[in-house]
Image: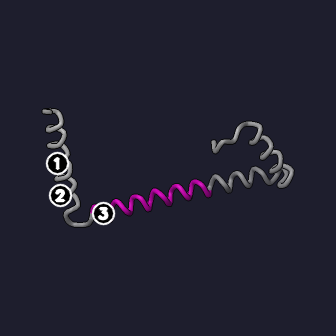
Amino acid sequence: MFGLGTPELVVILGIAFLVFGGKKLPEIGSGLGKAISSFKNGLSEVDKGGKDLVEGIPGVKEVASVKQQVQQVKDMGNILK
């Protein structure tokens, strides 16, 4: 995990414990977990919105099917060689 080993993580957690105290660490962890979850949800919504936008453009599905057919023909040509 980012080149951090167990000793490094223990030192980081020890410093965090000294700086924030035992009562604040669970609150900080909870807030960090909620922030990460919210960030992931936001990314998935943006990804879904982008896919919906692309699929709404006329001709995208047709181009994708033609591209797939061309790839199949290329693969068949490679097999015959």
In this rendering, position of residue 55 left or right of residue 36:
left
Please report the bounds of the magenta region as a residue range: 35-55
Q: Is residue 68 magenta?
A: no
- Disc 2 is placed on an element classified as helix
Coordinates of residue 48 in the picture (x, y in percent): 39, 58
Q: How many marks?
A: 3
User: Can you tell which quarter of the image residue 73 is in?
Assistant: top left
* Dot 2 crowding, Cα within 10 Å, few <14, some 14–19, many 20+: few
Query: What amino acid type is highlighted by mark number 3?
Result: Val
Q: Which residue is mark 3?
A: 54
Disc 2 target residue: 62
Q: Residues within 10 Å of mark 3 (few under 14, many from 20)?
A: few
Foreground disc of the pair 3, 1: 1
Q: Secondary structure at mark 1?
A: helix
Amino acid on which disc 2 is placed: Glu
Q: Are marks 3 and 1 in contact (CB under 8 Å)?
A: no
Query: Which image quadrant: the N terminus?
Result: top right
In the rendered structure, which disc, 1 or 2, sits on the residue that comes first in sequence? 2
Q: Nearer the viewer, residue 59 or 49?
A: 59
Please state which of residues 80 and 38 is positioned toward the viewer in this rendering.
Answer: 80
Instruction: Give the spatial CA distance, label 3 vs label 2.
Output: 12 Å
Magenta stretch: dominant secondary structure: helix
Query: What residue type is disc 1 on?
Result: Val
Distance from disc 3 to disc 1, alpha carbons, whole Å, reads 21 Å
Query: Which of these two is toward me, 22 or 50?
Result: 50
Q: Quadrant of residue 5?
A: top right
Q: Give the residue at x 80% y 51%.
A: 16
